[in-house]
């Protein structure tokens, strides 16, 4: 269940990555293409070992008259880096043009006014800057042609190369960097070596010991989010879980211990738990095969965020040798509470898996917990989603009833559907792709719905369903709308086996509608909002009472809304004289035979 996927098709070769980039840039205007690729290039530079010493690249706000560079680093150490990003380059003249702008920039800096000084000694001149050219295409052939002739900037090129001040990041280097970023974000380490200052205690398949916090930070520096590939959740941030203005969150308390009393970290913190397929003792240390932190992401990241202050911190470590990460995770003692439903869902959907599927599908997940590797991949894509939107949608589609989006009861999940859609790459891809499409279209129609319903008093109590922090309502209505369009009531479940086949057909049909005729879905969604507003009112209630009971109504209303919307769509088609063909759903079993 926790097997790491192979690399996606776009990382099979330099050409496939270039085609992937071009595909996701093809719908952008020329200026937007340049801006998007410059954003990507700036993040790429932060991941390159030979350029990371320059620090972050700050992009120029001006898109024209930018002096020939898209962005520059702050002065770091002895130098500064200027970057020019070009999505595509095909001629030696384009190379010469970029170098000419670099040369003009350097000449202007050399001729600029020197600061006046009261001292007789002039201040030392600023160190010469370095330059980076980033492009998605291979440049070897073009550079060979450029070097074969003496173009206007050739002498400046030779000067930069001789001084080690020109860095060319072309398709080959870009491919290597993106591939490494993907592995860092989505690949659990094959081998981890851990050393405990006090030695390791083994009992059966469990090892106990301590790690220097600085060693744990180094592990994250090496492996990034891959270290948490089988963790239930991501870094929550310092403010997550705050209850009152004068109350510290768990993560704030961890940070406070690190900064104020680091020597007491061991006694105050519960530590971390690794799961490993195999553990091997080796000269006072141990090697972990296919290891992952299944409990302790918050502790680890709190230490990472305070890396300069962790030298005196020790971290308690438990290592469990097991093939089942989720059995270990469910039994672990979490300092930050984890809902039971999230533990049950973790083998099938969790932030790491969604990010991985999104990277392959060309969708960016807005996620503050992601590391630089994920941010690099996200910079390529236009479509944006939130993990919680997808999580609620997943719960609604694979529970006994979509009403469970509101209830969040783990025993209402359909185990046959959870395991069924996780068995093959095809079914996993179908589920993720359909959820991405459905969520993207929901985001589109929600923007439209705010405009249509926002000024209508009758809809006042229901505008909360469009709030960003209330994705469960939006996704609930998405399932109502797509179910009515297809003609399958997913709250009327069939027996195991039959229901998996029916849901597979449901997702295939939903994906086809969303791709070929998204307007039909958006229209049905708006009608679902209207049906909700009608059904949720009970007599002459004031708006305050309607708001109070909205979640309770949604938590039991799927079938009512499905039938109401289905009837409305039938009437609309009859009035319009339009007949849409839809698949015939398998005959629903009598209630006594349902699971």
Image (cartoon, rainbow, N blue to C red):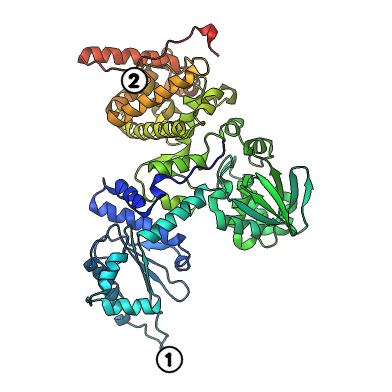
Circle 1 residue: 121
Regarding residue 470, the answer to whether it shows in the image is no
Mark 2, secondary structure of its residue = helix
Residue 560 image point, x, y percent: 42, 14
What is the residue that sits farthest to the left in this orientation? Answer: 577
- Among the 4 quarters of the image, the one containing residue 167: bottom left
- Among the 4 quarters of the image, the one containing residue 222: bottom right
The alpha-carbon separation of the residues under discs 1 and 2 comes to 80 Å
What is the residue that sits farthest to the bottom in this orientation? Answer: 120
Residue 197 image point, x, y percent: 75, 59
Label ID, residue 485: 2
Q: Quadrant of the C terminus?
A: top right
Q: Nearer the viewer, residue 55 or 141?
A: 141
| Residue 34 horizontal side relative to residue 494, left or right | left
Q: Quadrant of the N terminus?
A: top right
Image depth: mark 1 or mark 2 in front: 2
Q: Residue at x 47, y 65 (%)?
A: 52
Q: Residue at x 77, y 56 (%)?
A: 199
């Amino acid at each position: 269940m926790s097997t790491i996927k192979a690399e996606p098709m776009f990382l099979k070769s330099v050409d496939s990555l270039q085609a992937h980039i071009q595909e996701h840039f093809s719908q952008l205007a020329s200026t937007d293409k340049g801006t998007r690729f410059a954003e990507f290039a700036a993040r790429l530079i932060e991941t390159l070992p030979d350029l990371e010493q320059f620090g972050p690249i700050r992009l120029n706000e001006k898109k024209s008259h930018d002096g020939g560079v898209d962005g520059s680093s702050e002065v770091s150490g002895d130098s500064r880096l200027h970057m020019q990003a070009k999505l595509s380059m095909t001629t030696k003249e384009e190379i010469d043009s970029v170098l000419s702008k670099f040369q003009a920039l350097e000449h202007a800096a050399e001729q600029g006014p020197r600061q006046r000084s009261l001292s007789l000694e002039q201040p030392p001149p600023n160190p010469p800057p370095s330059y980076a050219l980033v492009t998605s295409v291979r440049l070897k052939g073009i550079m060979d042609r450029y070097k074969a002739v003496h173009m206007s900037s050739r002498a400046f090129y030779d000067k930069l190369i001789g001084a080690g001040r020109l860095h060319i990041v072309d398709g080959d280097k870009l491919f290597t960097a993106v591939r490494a970023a993907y592995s860092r974000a989505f690949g659990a380490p094959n081998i981890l070596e851990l050393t405990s200052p006090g030695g390791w205690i083994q009992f059966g398949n469990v090892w106990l010991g301590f790690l220097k916090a600085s060693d744990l930070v180094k592990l994250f520096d090496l492996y990034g989010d891959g270290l948490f590939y089988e963790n239930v959740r991501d870094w929550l941030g310092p403010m997550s879980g705050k209850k009152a203005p004068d109350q510290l969150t768990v993560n704030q308390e961890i940070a406070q211990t690190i900064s104020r009393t680091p020597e007491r970290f061991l006694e105050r913190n519960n530590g971390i738990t690794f799961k490993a397929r195999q553990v091997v003792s080796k000269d006072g240390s141990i090697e972990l095969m296919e290891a992952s932190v299944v409990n302790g992401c918050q502790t680890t990241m709190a230490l990472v965020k305070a890396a300069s202050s962790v030298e005196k911190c020790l971290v308690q470590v438990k290592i469990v040798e097991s093939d089942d990460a989720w059995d270990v995770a469910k039994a672990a003692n979490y300092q930050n509470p984890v809902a039971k439903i999230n533990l049950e869902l973790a083998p099938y959907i969790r932030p790491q898996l969604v990010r991985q599927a999104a990277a392959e599908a060309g969708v960016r997940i807005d996620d503050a917990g992601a590391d630089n590797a994920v941010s690099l991949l996200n910079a390529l894509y236009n479509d944006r989603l939130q993990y919680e939107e997808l999580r609620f949608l997943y719960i609604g589609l694979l529970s006994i009833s979509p009403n469970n989006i509101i209830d969040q009861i783990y025993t209402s999940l359909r185990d046959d559907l959870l395991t069924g859609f996780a068995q093959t790459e095809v079914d996993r891809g179908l589920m993720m792709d359909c959820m991405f499409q459905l969520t993207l279209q929901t985001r589109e129609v929600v923007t439209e719905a705010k405009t249509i319903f926002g000024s209508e008093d009758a809809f006042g109590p229901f505008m909360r369903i469009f709030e960003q922090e209330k994705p469960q309502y939006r996704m609930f209505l998405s399932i109502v709308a797509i179910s009515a369009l297809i003609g399958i009531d997913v709250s009327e479940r069939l027996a195991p086996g039959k229901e998996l086949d029916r849901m597979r057909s449901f997702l295939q049909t939903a994906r086809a509608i969303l791709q070929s005729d998204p307007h039909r879905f958006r229209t049905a969604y708006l009608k679902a909002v209207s049906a909700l507003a009608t059904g949720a009112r009970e007599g002459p209630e004031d708006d305050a009472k309607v708001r109070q009971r909205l979640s309770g109504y949604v938590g039991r209303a799927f079938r009512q809304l499905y039938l109401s919307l289905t009837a409305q769509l039938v009437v609309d088609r009859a009035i319009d004289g339009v007949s849409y063909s839809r698949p015939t759903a398998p005959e629903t079993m009598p209630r006594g035979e349902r699971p």
